[in-house]
Image (cartoon, helix red, strand yellow):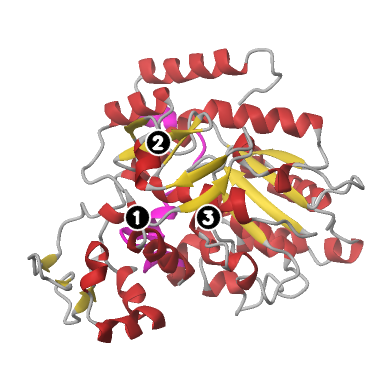
Amino acid sequence: MHYISHFFAFNVTQQSIMEAKTTEHDETVVYSEEWLSSLPKAKGITEDNTYQYQGFWFGTISLQGLIDCQQHFRPRQNDVLLVTAPKSGTTWMKAILYALLHRQKYHPQDAHHPLRQKTPHQLVPFMELTKPSEYDSLFLDSTSRIFGCHFPIRCLPKSITEEDDDGSTNIKIVYLCRDIKDTFTSLFHFANKIGLRRTGSRNFVALGGTSYFFFILLNHEASLFIFVHIYLHKYIPIKFWGLLQMGALGDCLTRLHYEPALGLRSSPVSLEEAFHLFCKGTNVAGPIWDQILEYWKESLERPNKVLFMRYEELKSEPHAQLRRLARFLGRPFSPEEELMEMVDQITSLCSFGSMSKLQVNSTGHFLPGVSNSSYFRNGQVGEGNKWLTPEMAAKLDQITQDKFRGSGLKL
């Protein structure tokens, strides 16, 4: 429910002003509609519009989450931050990190393991979608806070990137990247699976200047859902505020295919248009090459702070990569755990085949218009070559080669 509450908080108070400090110039930014309109604006792949801030592009929701993070986030010992470009294996790595760090409390073969009851995104929340008041409250029963995000390293607050005076590192950063062509292909398919564009719903919308809510009947079901229109919040009758506070309307929202308030694209995107925008770098957290390269360089300079991982290596040698990850986090597998085949059990629990078949991951919605199943398509290596024309593939390869030249990084 914290995702929905953040969704309401942003939209119901769009005109309110929030002060936030950037890390790049150490200046105070006033977050408002006026400030947002002052930023460079472009078309996105998963969003209608993205905005350029500190050299990268963000949707409205992720931009607010970044400003909140820059101003309010305070790291704790044992914190872990997973960073990825969108569609680079985020869901998979969230599951792995959760299972790895909680293996003493929750055995991977436990029939009631949290990963069998909740989605990886519920257990490892996106920082973009988490309110500052929830930075601690979401982890009351855990000694390790694990967050995921798509933030470039230059945008992270100094409280995360810098070390304490005594030289200790308060927070570990795990960065996972993926083949550029495969990342783009997955992003293209994801963009066309989310939002309001799916047909088959019968919608009755009560419109009008004094309308208080929408009645929406979905998929020929008998259930009637009440959706209070976020832009008419000041007209909502008092009797509805109790429902808002209890989260009942939020529960309804998770089942609606309603994208405008989240900024999701209101129409399908073609392969050609998505490719053009991806090369321009105006997709969320783009340009992807710049994000990858910055984390790569940081991992070379501070290997105890940033672990750079590749999706393809995680697929081809999962056991070796899981052991590497465990050592980096200071939680290596003991000889006893090796004898118990703990590594194999975590790998099995978090495999695509296991995760995608769970009811919690195949039904329901993560956000309005974003189904849980949209995060489980196939996860195959080399898929980009099946969808892209030879010219498209060659162009991405050339951009990648030019961007990474001299860095020692190869994808």
Q: Does the magenta stretch include residue 130?
A: no
**Residue 387, image x and y in percent?**
35, 30
**Element type where label 2 sits in the image:** strand
Residue 15's disc number: 1
Q: Which of marks 2 and 3 is in front?
A: 2
Classify residue 333 as left or right of residue 115: right
What residue type is disc 1 on? Answer: Gln
Few, some or many residues within 10 Å of mark 1 (<14, 14–19, 20+): few
Tell me the residue that label 2 is attached to: 51
Q: Does label 1 or label 2 sit earlier along the sequence?
A: 1
**Residue 40, image x and y in percent?**
38, 29
Q: Are marks 1 and 3 in contact (CB under 8 Å)?
A: no
Residue range in magenta is: 361-387
Q: Do the residues labelled 2 and 3 touch (CB within 8 Å)?
A: no
Disc 1 versus disc 3: distance between alpha carbons?
Answer: 42 Å
What residue type is disc 2 on? Answer: Tyr
Q: Does label 1 or label 3 sit earlier along the sequence?
A: 1
Few, some or many residues within 10 Å of mark 2 (<14, 14–19, 20+): many
Residue 352's disc number: 3
Q: Is residue 386 above or below residue 114?
A: above
What residue type is disc 3 on? Answer: Phe
Residue at screen point 20% across, 51% down = 197
